[in-house]
Structure formats: C-alpha cells, structure tokens
Amino acid sequence: MERNAETGSSRAQDAEVVWTADDVARFLGVDLKGVYNAARRGEIPHRRIGRRVVFLRSALLDWLRSNSAPAARKGKP
C-alpha cells in the first residue's frame, strides 16, 4: 500500500468517507425525507453532484460537534 510522504498515512486513510442520504438518516436516526429537507434548507453540510446529494462523514461529524447542545440534567430546567 502506498504511503503519503508528508503524513505517513496510507491512501486508504486519506480517502474521504462519503455517505448517502440513507446512510445519514440511519446514523442520525431520522427519516430520509428529514435528511433531504435539512440539506435543502442548508441546515446540514452536504454536496450536490448533479442531482445526487452526498455527505462527507468528517463534515457531518464536525457539524454535530459544533451544533450539539449540552445534555439536560434530570430534574434541572
């Protein structure tokens, strides 16, 4: 397997993981229509390739980290 001279990582590690809307819906536990609606409204990071909508896993995880609210504590407002 080829290695990247700068980072020492393999090509397989350098490849970006791309998810479909169905993958995202399963991962987030929402319905497919909700994923497409969120993408259309610009609420979730995505890319369009022609008519196809795809999601970069790393961008989605970054988005989740930056947009998540702290968990509410039981018994506290």
Image (cartoon, rainbow, N blue to C red):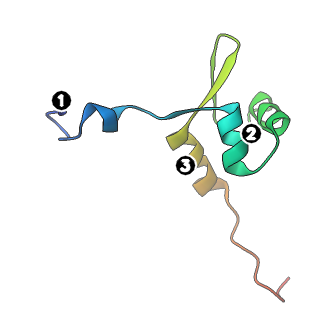
- Judged left or right of residue 6, residue 24 is right
Dot 3 lies on which element? helix
Q: Residue at x 79, y 28 (%)?
A: 40
Q: Amino acid at mark 3?
A: Asp
- Judged left or right of residue 56, residue 76 is right
Picture quadrant where residue 34 is located: top right
Q: Are marks 3 and 1 in contact (CB under 8 Å)?
A: no
Q: Earlier in the sequence, mark 3 or mark 1?
A: 1
Picture quadrant where residue 11 is located: top left
Q: Earlier in the sequence, mark 1 or mark 2?
A: 1
Q: Residue at x 80, y 32 (%)?
A: 41
Residue at mark 2 = 43
Direction left: furthest residue: 5
Q: Amino acid at mark 1?
A: Glu
Q: Any mark on residue 12, and which? A: none
Picture quadrant where residue 46 is located: top right
- The front one of 73 and 16 is 16
Q: Residue at x 19, y 33 (%)?
A: 4
Residue at mark 3 = 62
Residue at mark 1 = 2
Q: Are marks 1 and 2 in contact (CB under 8 Å)?
A: no
Dot 1 lies on which element? loop
| Residue 75 higher or lower than 40, as above or below | below
Q: Amino acid at mark 2?
A: Glu
| Residue 58 higher or lower than 50, as above or below | below
